[in-house]
Amino acid sequence: MRVSSEEELAEAVRGACAPLTVRGGGTRPVGSTGAGAALDVSGLAGITLYEPGALTVVAKAGTPLAALEAALAAEGQRLAFEPADWRGLLGTAGEPTLGGMVAANVSGPRRVQAGACRDALLGVRFVDGTGAVVKNGGRVMKNVTGYDLVKLMAGSWGTLGVLTEAAFKVLPAPEAAATVIIGVEGADAAVRVLSAALGTPFDVTGAAYLPGEGALVRIEGFAASVAYRAERLAAALGAHGPVAVEADAERVAALWCRVREVAPFHGKAGDVWRISVRPSDAPGLVARIGGAWMLDWGGGLVWALLPEGSDLRAALGPIRGHATLIRAAAATRARIATFAPEPAALAAISAGLRARFDPRGILNPGLMG
Amino acid sequence: MDLPVADRSVLARKAEIVARLRAAMADGAVIDDPAETRAYECDALAAYRCAPLAVVLPGSTAEVAAVLKVCHEERVPVVPRGAGTSLAGGALPTADSVILGVARMNRVLDVDYDDRFIRVEAGRTNLSVTGAVEEEGFFYAPDPSSQLACAIAGNIAMNSGGAHCLKYGVTTNNLMGVTLVTMEGDVVEIGGAHLDAGGYDLLGVVCGSEGQLGVVTEAVLRILPKPEGARPVLIAFGSNEVAGACVADIIKAGVLPVAIEFMDRPCIRACEAFARAGYPDCEALLIVEVEGAEAEIDEQLGLIRQTAARHDPVEFRESRSAEEAQKIWLGRKSAFGAVGQINDYMCLDGTIPVSALPKVLKRIGEMSRDFGLDVANVFHAGDGNMHPLILYDANKPGDLETCEALGAEILKLCVEVGGCLTGEHGVGIEKRDLMEVQYSAADMEAQMRVKDVFDPRWLLNPAKVFPLHMSAGRRAG
């Protein structure tokens, strides 16, 4: 079923008597059971409001991310949280949409400096499981009027409601960018140098480690300022290993695209896990899990490629954080939960919310526990 | 202001309830003498007062849990309280409620500079969080005006902002985890020293829920390395409209100042009389602050100067020393105090799209004349968060009511132009009855469902946020 307006969508949900699988561009089918009839919302597209002077954009949920990013780029602005395209990683086709990005709360390397998708999200409109149209938040940067359901919707994978529109804070795109590359080996050394970089006042907007390629530290801004900070960082981090500075705009962009899209794992067999931990726990974690891995967010985000069917959570031990099984065969998914199981008290709250927003249990059943 | 009818059975059992609370707490942590509970009858919104049943001041998460368990069993409403600096009446008691103050819980529990977080007890004051890490060159970004006094607990409850949000965001963007005690007395950890949620973003929902979903006893906060330097400029204009247009142009120019503050003539005049900051004689002024190394600051200020020049400023004042910088901020920082010296005032907190600034300022001027009350405007222009101060005379019969009516009209205007009722102070008791201006019945229903899940008996922070007629059925259950 394809809908092209919020009213049609509300009617479709109200009239549904069987489960629905919400679909935007279909590029992030993480843990989807596909149990219900497809509800295609890609027809709900278009930018409804863009005010560059207010750093605000509002668009319908089915809007292709590429179209939104092009409109922002035309005004010298961008989505600061750097949403990643997962098609290469997941082997999917189609067009990533705004709604899908919000539903998955997708944030890239700039998460460490500019916040996550949920932090840039100012307002949402959605249709809940009863078919009611709900709005929350708005289009202004500071808004504490009532409860923040905007955050609740981000990362809820369409299980609490079907997004129809979202408003974002956008930021100016920088004039220049550079990457300081430190030749270190191993997670221990990498997290040490990335923590050191993130502890400087030089406004680091990316801190990643690709084994074999070194620790990568990104800075962005006005050209003179980027040059100044690259020099200061190179001096400050030199004790950790040999330092090189990449200042070519295209090569800097391509490198961070590889980090964002987890390019080292593209086309490689195995299960892909995405693990959020405190950075200093990352070295211990990667030592225990084996397999291939890479680090983003200064070590706070671990991407791991494991042999099919291995349960990474068993290796987490006492480490606090959460692991999501991003890519896996159906047989693995049948055995290992896609999303991290929550402690009983939180699980009860989550289940309670879901039961109230979708009392008939028709929105993406089976997804998110 | 309507409050729900007090539960008579609770009032009748006061002695028994107080005895149970005493048994659950360390000595002296329960106050029920009316002379001593007076200090808790209101918060910074002093126009509304109500004596609580009792006040408890627990010293640990375990004591908070014990108190909540007793209150849940006895069906006693609980009003969580941080430092009591709410401007929205967020900590106003009801006659049948127990005030649960966390001010005694103010320790730093853990600091990690490599992982860039601090874990504190929630009663700790905002400024003393930065105080705990500044020697190592770090700071905690959200900086509400009351930061010397206000507690992290209240910051989380109201999702507080401050002057530097344009760059650093508000509380919710700097909060990584909480220890939350539910009304039933269960202690749950949400989030932690890692980023983002693995399941639903419950942390995002708790932040800004005005103490109605649980009591936050500990918080993990993101700390940031301090920038190398910061410098403000002052730009004076011949009209509010031109100043407003300049704000939008600065943002469009690709500069991201850490703060853009706006003051109009009535406010400038009050500040001059009070703080003698030496502000120019003008209709409106902006204080724009940028950060970085000296050369970086020069470059950004150069761009701002070019942008401002297109709007014929009356004056563009740079600061060449720390003293001059301080002087630029002096008037703005003393604005509320200055206005308070000459008048009683009510501080509003609506947010508007930055593009609507000139129109809204013009309309506020017209409304001010219609209602016969002066309005001084001082606000965070970069993010559209306005703080119109309505001046009135508390001793003049009817003046407070006129002031409230004007305030409501201004907030309705904020919503009408695409903004909201409150940008950083919260709904509390003050804006509760205006919620329907911004939200439909379905919008409110969705929010109240969240409350149903966390606090099924609706005992936490009663009478706030939701208009009483909308929550009546739920509260009765």
Image (cartoon, rainbow, N blue to C red):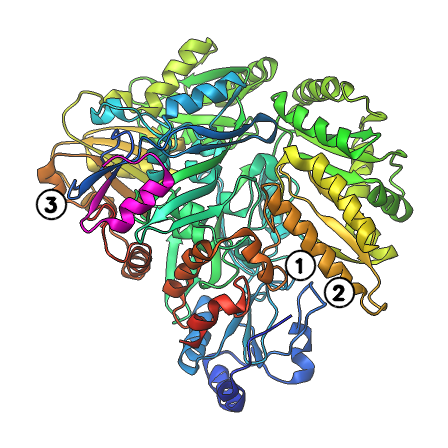
What segment is highlighted magenta in the picture?
A1-21
How far is the residue under mark 1 from the one under mark 2? 17 Å
Label 2: few (<14), some (14–19) or many (≥20) C-alpha neighbours in 10 Å: few
Are callouts 1 and 2 both on one chain? yes
For image coordinates 61% across by 51% down, the residue present is B422
Instruction: Give the residue type at disc 3.
Output: Arg
Q: Say if A76 sits above or below B9 in the image.
A: above
- Give x and y (percent) for residue B269: 88, 44
- The percent coordinates of residue B14 (x first, y second) are 53, 88
Q: Secondary structure at mark 2?
A: helix
Which of the 4 image quarters holds residue A265? top left
- Residue A18: in magenta span: yes
- The circle on residue B401 is 2
- What subunit carries mark 2? B
**Amino acid at dot 1:** Leu
Is B35 covered by the magenta stretch?
no
Answer with the quarter of the image where residue A202 lies. Answer: top right
Is residue B213 visible in the rendered image? The answer is yes
Say which residue label 3 marks: A335
The residue beneath circle 1 is B87
Name which quarter of the figure residue A105 lies in: top left
